[in-house]
Amino acid sequence: MTDAHDFYIDLKLPLDHRLHFGDDYNPLNAWRLLSRNISRTPHNLRLHTQRILLCIEANLEKVLLGAFQDLSIALSLSGKRFYFNLLDKAKDSLSAGNYTKLSNLFENTETVNCWLNGSVLSNGICTSKALVIHHKKEIVQAGYDNNLEEALALIDEGQIDEARIILEQALLDNFDDILIEEELLLIYQSTRDKEALENMTQRLLEAEATPSLAWEAYMNTSEEW
């Protein structure tokens, strides 16, 4: 693609940021990095654009639908021109059915959060009745060196609840693991799950762990969730 800067013109973002990765990147690692950053800053449209372009260029069709779903959630019914310009770029990487699904997704407020593979922002609610759809998959345990790596892989697949459970237990096993704590707090924040944060705080106190300053800060800001 040669006209990636068109997106920056539409968005009035700086033109000196690169949208494309170099030739020496690992697509899966790049996807994981972008997904983690999107879960932290869901309204960063440059990250969404990079992730979609990555899916197109690296033939990551399996997660391309979820990438567009996250963009739709982030735009929240605004930026229609931006969304469809980017969708047209991906048209050749999508089946006719999936292209139509993504075209309809943007303005369908009842299904926009109904989970698609690759999404990290969807809450799984498919109708106004708040039906939560749980997508389960077999995890190859031998593929992960530690709990954090396994949790990050689950986050990349949009399995946020499963990742949270793993991180909660990992933190109870090691109160001083800053990386585990950081990822867990980000999940609570991105899902606005104040109840889960409060429950985990109680579990830490019962285990005689002193909440860190970062943890206390999230507890304070959770009042606004």
Image (spheres, rainbow, N blue to C red):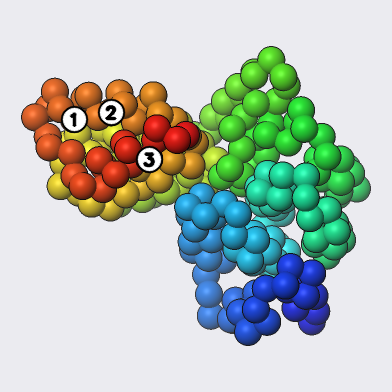
Question: Is there a contact, CB below 8 Å, between mark 2 and mark 3?
Answer: no
Q: How far across and down, in percent of the image, does residue 16 sit?
A: 63, 84
Instruction: Sort mark 3 into few (<14), some (14-19) or many (20+) by Cα contacts within 10 Å.
Output: few
SS for dot 2: helix
SS for dot 1: helix
Q: How far across and down, in percent of the image, does residue 45 sit?
A: 65, 61
Q: How far across and down, in percent of the image, does residue 13 sit?
A: 67, 73
Tell me which numbered mark, 1 or 3, is placed earlier along the sequence: 1
- Foreground: 61 or 6? 6
Q: How far across and down, in percent of the image, does residue 214 sit?
A: 26, 48
- Type of amino acid at the residue the image marks with label 1: Leu
Tell me which numbered mark, 2 or 3, is placed earlier along the sequence: 2
Say which quarter of the image contains residue 116.
top right
Q: Is residue 103 visible?
A: yes
- Looking at the image, is mark 2 or mark 3 nearer the viewer? 3
Residue corresponding to mark 1: 204
- Foreground: 42 or 29? 42
- Type of amino acid at the residue the image marks with label 3: Thr
SS for dot 3: helix
Q: Which label is found at residue 221? A: 3
For residue 4, above or below residue 77: below
- Type of amino acid at the residue the image marks with label 2: Met
- Looking at the image, is mark 1 or mark 3 nearer the viewer? 3
Say which quarter of the image contains residue 194.
top left
Residue corresponding to mark 2: 200
Question: Is there a contact, CB below 8 Å, between mark 2 and mark 1?
Answer: yes
Query: Looking at the image, which residue is at 24% across and 29% down?
Result: 201
Query: Looking at the image, which residue is at 15% across and 47% down?
Result: 176
